[in-house]
Amino acid sequence: MKPVKTLDQHIAVFGESGSGKTVLISSFYGAAQEPRALRNNLFHVVADDVGEGTRLHQNYLGMRDESRVPAANKFSATSHSFSIKLKDAGNSRDLKGSPFQALRLVWHDYPGEWFHQEVSGPTEAERRVDTFRSLLGSDVALLLVDGQKLVDHAGEEERYLKSLLGNFRNSLLSLKDDLLEDGKPLVEFPRIWVIALSKADLIPEMDVINFRDLLIRKVAGEIGSLREVLGEFVVGDEALSVGEDFMLLSSAKFEPGKIAVDERIGVNLILPLAAMLPFERHVKWARAKQLPGKVAEALLGAGAFSAGAVAAVLLGAKFLPGPLGRVAGIVGTLLPKDRLDQAFQLGGKKLRALNDQALSEQKYLTATLTGFKMDLEKAEKDQILLRSVQ
């Protein structure tokens, strides 16, 4: 039996202590185990570590049934791996010959205490560096803005926001010498930094446009400074999005004595973001010729997990691997350029029609990826997500 080829997508989540990271991942996993999700989704979300999955599900059930908030994991650096398994993989007609047959989400949780507290000694300092190294393969990073703290600083939000961004920037600078060998910037590094409002249920009048405008109005300079620091870590900082994408997140609606876990905001977008945003952004950068050769090879490649491969699955097309070409032609070595553009530009009625066709033809992997694109499109319409137009 041939091994299943799996497309791994990594996401790194950053936020200060108390910003809701533990609740967020518990809500993500627990919601995926609910009967409605099991019935309606084309896939199962399965924790690769069974014990870890049980703990996250227990956290979720504690919120749902006992209105109990999970305990925070202080100074706990954890990577969670979830396999996205097609429910009817045996009957899926697009898996044979596909560049990949399954998806995996790897979720890296960076301890919030390291934002604003000094490490206790050399052992913890080394652990902090190792933790950051473990998430360097992430394409997408979420930087959480705590909705509770925005409420607490109403009218003077810049006090909190400047502290958040300044602490994060300084934390990165303190790691720089340990992460860059001989001061050389990295090819592999998170390049898409989405700023997300956690606990968005506390500010129901704020949509994602209002959130973006608040940040630009109050801390545009600090976002620019953060981008400059992140740019010092990477080869080809033209291919870097910082503070260009925004989203709202709420793991549940919290009320006195009650946690309504079914009233989530944006949690269902985590998987589509991790799977589709890198593809969209990498192709956009390639089309704008913003990818140096070394970076293009790393991000686009010419193998089973390249942008061309994702595009082929999106379109339900044949996948024909080919040799790595020059930078301008890399994405065209696996799929004709017009077909790549077609996949990149999919949206609206065409996207819906392709999704319907994939379902009718039992091409469940294609249906899953086109469904992810539809989820992102709907979230923008609902003003929960705002993707970069750059």
Image (tube, rainbow, N blue to C red):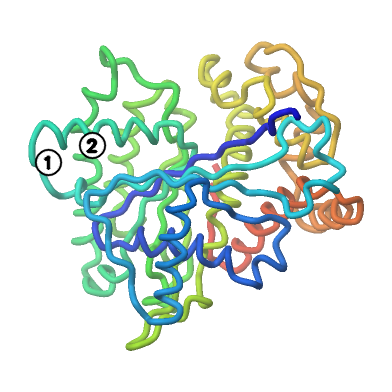
Q: Residue at x 34, y 77 (%)?
A: 68
**Could you say which is closer to the camera, residue 192 or residue 112?**
112
Q: Secondary structure at mark 2?
A: helix
Q: Do the CB atoms of the residues marked 2 and 1 lie less than 8 Å apart?
A: yes
Please report the residue visible at 68 percent of the width from the left and 41 percent of the height from the top.
Answer: 102
Q: Nearer the viewer, residue 272 or 104?
A: 104
Find the distance from the CA under tag 2 to the CA under tag 1: 8 Å
* First-in-chain label (2 vs 1): 1
**Looking at numbered disc 1 in the image, what kind of residue is underneath it?**
Val
Q: What residue sits 68% from the left and 32% below the top?
A: 5
Label 2 belongs to which residue? 128
Residue furthest left in the image: 121
Residue 324, image x, y percentages:
68, 13
Name the residue furthest right.
361
Would residue 296 be found to the left or right of residue 133 on screen?
Answer: right
> Can you say whether 214 is above or below 230 in the image?
below
Label 1 sits on residue: 119
